[in-house]
Image (cartoon, grey):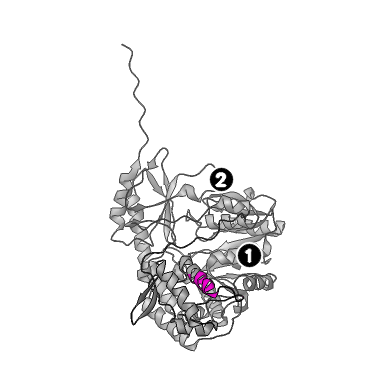
Amino acid sequence: MDLHVTLQGRGDLAAQVYRQLLDAILDGRLRSGERLPPTRELARRLEISRNTVALAYDRLVADGFLVGRAGAGTFVSAEPVRGRAAPKGVVRPRAIWRELGPPAHTPDAPYDFRVGAPDPRLFPMETWRRLVTRELRVGAAAYGDPSGYEPLRDAISRHIGISRSVHAAAGDVLITNGAQQALDLIGRVLIEPGACVAVEEPGYPPARLLFRSLGARVAGVPVDAEGIDVQAIPNAARIVYVTPSHQFPLGTPMSMARRAALLAWAERRRAVVIEDDYDSEFRFGERPLEPLQSLDRAGRVIYVGSFSKTLLPMLRLGFLVAPASLAPALRTARQLSDWHGELPTQAALARFIDEGLLARHIRKATREYAARHAMIAEMLEGDDRLRPVPSTAGLHLCARLAPGVSVRPAPGLALERLESYCGETPAQPGLVLGYGAIGRDRIPEGLRLLKRSLRMPAAPEAPVPFS
């Protein structure tokens, strides 16, 4: 192992070696069972006497931190050693970070209706492994372009041009680590402290929280059956974040009239529209309406896409298409953030798209998700307690709870409430049911368990008649 020990001055050298080894053990850098270098080797590296190192080893053995094995060497004790935490310190984050709190984690459940998770069993993992292995053999060693691997940018521009009618050349595409990084880069480039950013209500919580963390004043704008209410957007807003293809979480598409109104508003107010097209690939009905990006004639729309739903979330692959006036700043922001993503993964995705494998995977996955969507909608039909919101795309559907109906926690059932997507009051009662993480074989029992967990409002007591 590459054990790092440094000595200062010519004081008690054995004590220095002892202290640094002890620190490494307590900090967890030297783990239980790890073998230490022989005393002769460490002494040679430190240019000190072997006896000095041996004395330090002997003290650690006596204290129970090391154990010697005849003919094998010296090892960190197999007894568990509690790692030392970093100093608590007195430095505090900005107030907004105390408000946001740590990210929530929901444990796995047998009947998992959580939102946003595609089914990994549908992904052609062996094919993907072959493509990534091929790129790792090539192994580019230099830093890459902050905008991303050029063949992938070209492949994405063609893919979204065919599948979504997005107008973009390879030079207009910037590769990101998922859609969330795309939103972060846009915010870094455009959001001034105190600026007003309008978001859909209900809407995507991570976007709302991200904009707040960047110093924005976030205003929720109501959503109806046609999409965001353009007339309710604050005049002070200079950025509007929307999900027009498949409103998140309600699932309804933005009407063409509302799209035109939003673009006209953005031009009048000199504002920017962020169009998040997060899972429009999975469509079960008619062809979607034209994206805002392709309708935009004033260069005010930034189009954001992600492969987290179409492929796997762990790959962290997304992209944005921005007007040319913003491209240099966004590229610089990406370089200052993390320079670029994993080039072998980007190269593998370029081949995945060019060889037609992405289109094939989307067709296969769409059939499966359409069947799950139809199964859930059919099983909820006729139940007045839970009314599905019509939708024809994506990995989830929303259902509104009837007035007074509540949901009791049920063991083994993972659900997401519509209220959690509302940033402002009054919250809207309902459920958002994802079907990417639950197989068709588990959906019927999961929905039966859900229905048993619904609690009707108590009936008013009958008046006592006068005698």
Asked if the stretch drawn in magenta spans residue 57, the answer is: no
Q: Where is residue 423 in the image (x, y as percent from the top left)?
A: 55, 48
Question: Is 180 left or right of 374, judged from the image as shown?
Answer: right
Spatial CA distance of label 2 from label 1 is: 24 Å
Task: Find residue 30 and report its horizontal and vertical position in percent.
Answer: 45, 71
Asked if residue 228 is positioned above or below residue 49 in the image, the reply reads above
Q: Residue beneath label 1, please?
A: 186
Residue 8 versus residue 437: which sits nearer the camera?
8
Magenta stretch, residue numbers: 9-21
Residue 17 covered by magenta stretch: yes
Residue highlighted by disc 2: 424
Amino acid type for the residue under numbered disc 1: Ile
Q: Which residue is drawn at 38% across and 46% down?
A: 386
Image location of residue 378, percent across then percent down? 33, 54
Q: In the displayed structure, does residue 332 sit left or right of residue 61?
A: right
Crowd class of label 1 (few under 14; some 14 to 19; many from 20; radius 10 Å): many
